Image (tube, coloured by chain):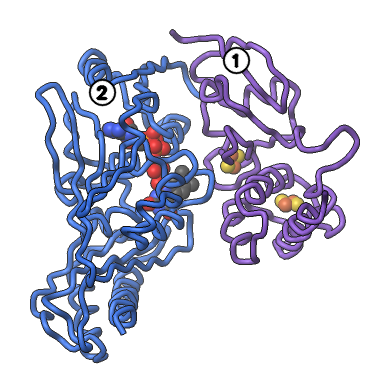
Chain colours: A blue, B purple
Amino acid sequence: MLRRFDVHRVTSIAEAVDARQRFGEDAAIYAGGTELLLAMKMGVARWPHLIDVKAIPALGRITATNDALRIGATATHWDIERNALVGGALPALARLEANVANVRVRAAGTLAGNLAFGEPHADPPSMLIALGARVVLEGKSGTRSVAVHEFITGMYQTALAGDEIIVAIDIPLPAKDVRVAYVKFQILERPSVGVAALGTVRDGRFVGAPTVVVGAVDEVARAVPTAQFAGADARDARTLDAIAEAARAAVEPTADLAGSVEFKRHLVGVFTQRVCATLAAQAS
Amino acid sequence: MGSREIHLRVNGGERRVVIEDQTLLIELVRSLGLVGTKLSCDSQVCGACTVLLDGRPVSSCTTLAIEADDKPVVTIEGLADGAKLHPLQEAFIERFAFQCGYCTPGMIVSAKALLDAYPEPDVATVRHWMDGNICRCTGYQTIVEAVLDAAEQMRGAP
Ligand SMILES: Cc1cc2nc3c(=O)[nH]c(=O)nc-3n(C[C@H](O)[C@H](O)[C@H](O)COP(=O)(O)OP(=O)(O)OC[C@H]3O[C@@H](n4cnc5c(N)ncnc54)[C@H](O)[C@@H]3O)c2cc1C
Ligand code: FES
Ligand code: FES
């Protein structure tokens, strides 16, 4: 049972921005509703007005150029995991999306909604941050784009302004020889830990430094300082141990149902090792 | 605002209904007597409330009924053809894929969407697709077998 509210179906971005200004704090943007309606049912949030953005045609599109993917704000996990452009250009993202939540949440829930909710136990942020993805926002004073790591500012907190909506997520495509990998560990509905890594391995060594971002254990996803591993032997267990150690040091896990601080920090080490080993294995 | 008329297309039938914006899809279908759809966790976790909306499985416990305006909805009652059960229903009986039966309508509707998308699924595909449907009785093995049996049956059927 939900308490009474009105749903306003807007059909253009301009109308959505107008509605945001008109209703202010009394309204929330409504996409798949997989988080919003749950929060409203539990009584932790109440909005008399919901602004439904799903009928804005431009927001549903997934497009690609040679060097970037643009995922429209109303594209669902289901759409993304099956999209041929995504599968072709960034198969690691398609796989990640295919393993978000369950099939019903994927069928209705959007990537933009996932980012906008700022729930820490999430899969996409770590990979999007590793790739340097940006959230494209539109508000009364125009368009701006914010890097994902600056967009998610804390637990359930984002840089979205009161008059703005997310219109798309822009994801730069890595160069051909760059590998992208993601591993997660999960005992509940959402990940306990997820680690994304990106790097080039040539003749067994990292070309430059690998990028490693740890998600789900902390209030926000954390990038691991990896500069010292530029050129390191990617197949040497000592390199992987050292990256894992850097990852454990980079996070401040939150104790919750998914585990204690010590347990999560341990997981971070194990899964960082695994994801980095995957980079080396893919390259051979 | 507040309430509106929608064009409902459930299990092949059509009608217009007036609902309030906050009405949930499960409330609507059950109010029409389609009580095969069950409410359990009420939080998108268990799948007991699964219905197909425009061909996709959704949690009717957390979907607004207004989303169904002019889109086909399939509930468990829409699968049998008169007295003739759907191959999934037959396979669930053959394989003893339920005990208390509370999860079953959601399991079968979710499996229907699976077989629509993947007519020849392997075990891993079935397990992955169905892992958001919780059963507290069977231990899942017989459910997976039933889905695979039904897939074979449906491929064989003319
Ligand atoms: C049972 C369950 C399991 C889950 N498991 C996982 C998991 O394993 N991994 C994972 O990463 N996630 C998981 N999730 C989260 C899931 O990915 C999100 O629920 C979903 O993507 C949210 O999208 P939505 O369209 O439903 O958002 P909504 O619920 O509609 O909205 C969520 C928030 O985003 C805002 N919003 C939506 N669209 C916009 C927009 N265009 N502009 C600005 N703000 C917007 C809303 O105002 C609201 O604050 C799970 C969720 C559930 C319920
Ligand atoms: S009752 Fe809807 S998912 Fe459990
Ligand atoms: S048969 Fe009882 S919950 Fe599945």
Q: Amino acid at mark 1?
A: His
| Image position, residue A38 (x, y; %) | 45, 35
Q: Residue at x 42, y 58 (%)?
A: A257
Left or right position of A136 against A122? left
Of all chains, the one bearing label 1 is: B
| Same chain letter for marks 2 and 1 | no
Please, what secondary structure does the residue beneath circle 2 have?
A: helix
Does label 2 point to a residue whose CB lies under 8 Å from ligand 1? no
Locate the N terminus of chain A and report the quarter of the image it occupies. top right
Left or right position of A139 against B41? left
Query: Farthest residue toward the right?
Result: B83
Of all chains, the one bearing label 2 is: A
Q: Residue at x 48, y 58 (%)?
A: A188
The quarter of the displayed image where residue A204 is located: bottom left
- Residue that carries the numbered disc 1 in the rendered image: B7
Does label 1 point to a residue whose CB lies under 8 Å from ligand 1? no
Q: Inspect this view and state whether residue B153 appears.
A: yes
Please, what secondary structure does the residue beneath circle 1 have?
A: strand
Q: Residue at x 85, y 42 (%)?
A: B85
Q: Residue at x 72, y 46 (%)?
A: B108
Q: Nearer the viewer, residue B71 or A28?
A: B71
Query: Which numbered marker is on residue A169?
Result: none
- Residue that carries the numbered disc 2 in the rendered image: A13
Left or right position of B85 against A269? right
The quarter of the displayed image where residue A220 is located: bottom left
Q: Nearer the viewer, residue A156 or B119?
A: B119
Locate the C terminus of chain A and report the quarter of the image it occupies. bottom left
| Image position, residue A102 (x, y; %) | 51, 51
Q: Amino acid at mark 2?
A: Ile
| Image position, residue A189 (x, y; %) | 48, 54
